[in-house]
Image: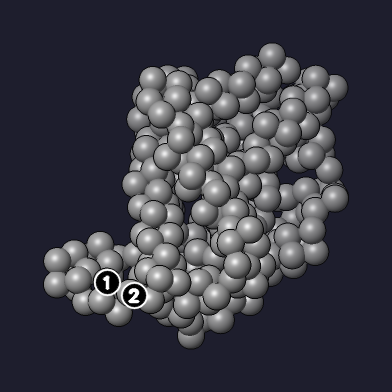
């Protein structure tokens, strides 16, 4: 399959960055902005995306559709795509790139293929590919190798296998470490500040675990505007681990922590309007000042 036109849904922070890289690579990149937020419309305009209006039109115009959105919306979007395919009898390649459990990915694959479409399991690991930042799109499924043709200098395509669910599984396990550890350390730093021992704890961390402490503090400034998206991601990790015979409770707790962060003043910011001079300790201080709901 030769790919010339790519649909990206939706053009949020990650989706916009990916779309810009694909445009620079020479692809025509479209999106569907009917019923989308003003923020999404603004980001799409800034990226120079072609708005085709509806999801149905997107399935008609594109050989490839990338679903890059809040994981809570992934199943609903797949249903919209499946409904459109049932009507127009088109067969684009649909790649779910969201942070979802393998079980959720199998549900999406079933919806798309039952409607006559084709599906690839995807998982994004890395930051939005802007500036010098690079990201990796892990893919799995019978047609995963088709995605190699959209690789760019800043978007690496890593084909895992022909088995749907593998890309989602590696995303879940990796995010369990990165975002799970971040949730745990943030909660204990907020607790230490409220208990009045933050200075002593900081000294102890610097003496014994400066690597972990520095890593989490460097990650915290960009986290609060994304916390609302990380809530369903933590729940998908919990679902993944429960299906593997492990406790879901650890990541249900992480979801609670991100729910708390999302409700704070800094959690209601967007990635574009956050205070970029704020450091990790500023984030801890501001969150510690908010009452726990």
In this view, 268 is above or below 236: below
Identify the image quadrant of residue 26: bottom right
Residue depicted at 60% across the width and 53% down the height: 259
Q: Which mark is residue 201?
A: 1
Residue farthest to the front? 195
Res. 6 visible in picture: no
Residue at 74% of width from left, 65% of height from top? 39
Find residue 283 and name its label. none
In the displayed structure image, the side of residue 110 where residue 166 appears, left or right: left
Classify residue 72 as left or right of residue 142: right
The local crowd at label 2, few if under 14, some if 14 to 19, many if 20 or more residues have their Cα within 10 Å, is: some
Q: Residue 198's mark?
A: 2
- Up the image or down, 224 lies above or below 74; here it is below
Q: Is residue 11 left or right of residue 278?
A: right
User: Gap between marks 2 and 1, in whole Å?
Assistant: 5 Å
Element at label 2: helix
- Along the line of sight, which residue is nearer the eye, 48 or 232? 232
Q: Residue at x 78, y 48 (%)?
A: 32
Residue 212 lies, in percent from the top left, at: 25, 62
Dot 1, how many residues are within 10 Å of its Cα: few (below 14), some (14-19), or many (20+)? some
Q: Please say if the residues under marks 2 and 1 sit with CB atoms less than 8 Å apart.
A: yes
């Amino acid at each position: 399959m030769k790919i010339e036109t790519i649909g990206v849904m939706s053009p949020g922070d990650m989706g916009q960055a990916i779309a810009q890289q694909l445009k620079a690579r020479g692809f025509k990149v479209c999106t569907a902005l009917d019923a989308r937020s003003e923020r999404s419309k603004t980001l799409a305009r800034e990226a120079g995306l072609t708005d085709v209006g509806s999801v149905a039109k997107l399935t008609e115009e594109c050989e490839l559709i990338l679903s890059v959105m809040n994981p809570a919306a992934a199943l609903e979007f797949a249903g919209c795509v499946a409904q459109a395919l049932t009507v127009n009898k088109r067969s684009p390649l649909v790649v779910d790139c969201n942070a979802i459990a393998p079980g959720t990915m199998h549900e999406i694959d079933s919806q798309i293929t039952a409607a006559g479409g084709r599906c690839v399991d995807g998982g994004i690991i890395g930051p939005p590919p802007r500036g010098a930042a690079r990201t990796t799109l892990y893919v799995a499924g019978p047609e995963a190798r088709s995605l190699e043709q959209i690789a760019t200098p800043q978007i690496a395509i890593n084909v895992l296998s022909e088995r749907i669910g593998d890309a989602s599984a590696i995303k879940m396990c990796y995010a369990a470490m990165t975002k799970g550890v971040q949730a745990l350390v943030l909660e204990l730093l907020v607790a230490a500040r409220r208990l009045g021992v933050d200075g002593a704890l900081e000294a102890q961390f610097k003496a014994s675990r400066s690597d972990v402490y520095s890593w989490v503090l460097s990650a915290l400034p960009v986290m609060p505007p994304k916390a609302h998206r990380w809530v369903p991601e933590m729940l998908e990790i919990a679902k993944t681990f429960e299906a593997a015979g492990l406790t879901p409770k650890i990541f249900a707790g992480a979801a609670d922590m991100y729910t708390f962060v999302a409700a704070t003043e800094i959690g209601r910011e967007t990635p574009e309007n956050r205070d970029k001079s704020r450091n990790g300790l500023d984030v801890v201080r501001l969150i510690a000042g908010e009452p726990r709901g």
